[in-house]
């Protein structure tokens, strides 16, 4: 059974720092991996989607990597800003049944 | 493209009443729609998967008679919470995918509906 774990559960850093959020999964038979952002009480905003054949994706200050064989992904945020404060969710799409399995999220607070 | 809307965004109702939440794909045909539930400070949990014109497939532990799902058209799915109780209060999110897209397994998410049952 696929399990997705996100570490840390919460993170608070000063503005301007570069930071890394981690996501690990137990079953490497995934179709893709996706990072989302969720603001309090709001819906989901897709940040980056990495296909299983890809190693990384970049969008602006965000870079996501995928190491399928080791079951790991990282989301790198450069030059963090207070507006980056949110919960970041990692999810994998299973090859076998195309179900999304979600991590519990990392709550990120960027202090001005 | 690939926009999914939900209505209402927020609803408050009394115990025992029923509430209907709509999920629409605005610019594509959603052959499959998914309904998720999110508890406070928890991740999303898949409730059911619905294919247009057929009965929804419910995940283990989800009461199909309580959470009625209808996917009558390629652009609309509804979730009706029947005889709502306070423990049904949650954030409900729908998503949809479009088989016509090259990566038809990508799901597009609605903005969510906050349900509060008094």
Image (tube, coloured by chain):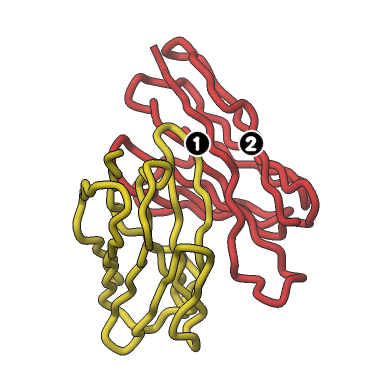
Of the residues under marks 2 and 1, which one precedes in the sequence?
Answer: 2
- From this view, report whether residue B70 is shown above or below residue A95: above
Q: Chain of mark 2?
A: B
What residue is shown at x 52% (from left), y 50% (from top)?
A45
- Name the residue: 30% across, 52% down: A105
Tell me, yes or no, whether dots 2 and 1 are on the same chain. Answer: yes
**Label 1 packing within 10 angstroms: few (<14), some (14-19), many (20+):** many
Say if B23 sits above or below A90 in the image: above
Given this view, does label 2 or label 1 mark the residue nearer the observer?
2
Chain where mark 1 sits: B
Q: CA distance from mark 2 to mark 1?
A: 16 Å
Rendered location of residue B61, percent (x, y):
34, 47
Taking the image as shown, residue A12 lies to the left or right of residue B18, namely left
Q: Is residue A80 left or right of residue A49?
A: left
**Whole-percent x and y of residue A24?**
26, 71
Foreground pick, B118 / A33: A33
Q: Are marks 2 and 1 in contact (CB under 8 Å)?
A: no
**Residue that mark 2 sits on:** B6
Of B76 and B26, the residue lying toward us? B26
- Say which residue label 1 marks: B67
Q: What secondary structure is marked by label 2? A: strand
Residue B63 at x, y = what percent?
42, 40
The quarter of the rendered structure image containing the C terminus of chain A is top left
Q: Secondary structure at mark 1?
A: strand
Q: Colour of chain B?
A: red
| Residue B60 on image: x %, y % | 36, 53
Q: Nearer the viewer, residue A49 or B35?
A: A49
The residue lying at 46 percent from left, 66 percent from top is A34
Q: Which mark is residue B52?
A: none
**Which residue is drawn at the image coordinates 78% and 57% (left, top)?**
B29
Query: What shade has chain A been given?
Result: yellow
């Amino acid at each position: 059974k696929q399990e997705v774990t996100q570490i840390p559960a919460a993170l608070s850093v000063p503005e301007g720092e570069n930071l890394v959020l981690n996501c690990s999964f137990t079953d490497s038979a995934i179709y893709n991996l996706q990072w989302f952002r969720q603001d309090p009480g709001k819906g989901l905003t897709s940040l980056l989607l990495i296909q299983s054949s890809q190693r990384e994706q970049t969008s602006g200050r965000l870079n996501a990597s995928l190491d399928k064989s080791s079951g790991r992904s990282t989301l790198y945020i450069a030059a963090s800003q207070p507006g980056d404060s949110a919960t970041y969710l990692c999810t994998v799409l299973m090859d076998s049944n195309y179900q999304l399995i979600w991590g519990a999220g990392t709550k990120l607070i960027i202090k001005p | 493209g690939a926009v999914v809307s939900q209505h209402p965004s927020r609803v408050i109702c009394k115990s025992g009443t029923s509430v209907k939440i709509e999920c629409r794909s605005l610019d594509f045909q959603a052959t499959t729609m998914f309904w998720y539930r999110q508890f406070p400070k928890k991740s999303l949990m898949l409730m059911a998967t619905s294919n247009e014109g057929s009965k929804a497939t419910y995940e283990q532990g989800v009461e199909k008679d309580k959470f009625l799902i209808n996917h009558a058209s390629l652009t609309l799915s509804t979730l009706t919470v029947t005889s709502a109780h306070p423990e049904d209060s949650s954030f409900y999110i729908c998503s949809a995918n479009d088989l016509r897209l090259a990566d038809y397994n990508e799901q597009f998410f609605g903005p969510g509906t906050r349900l509060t049952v008094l």
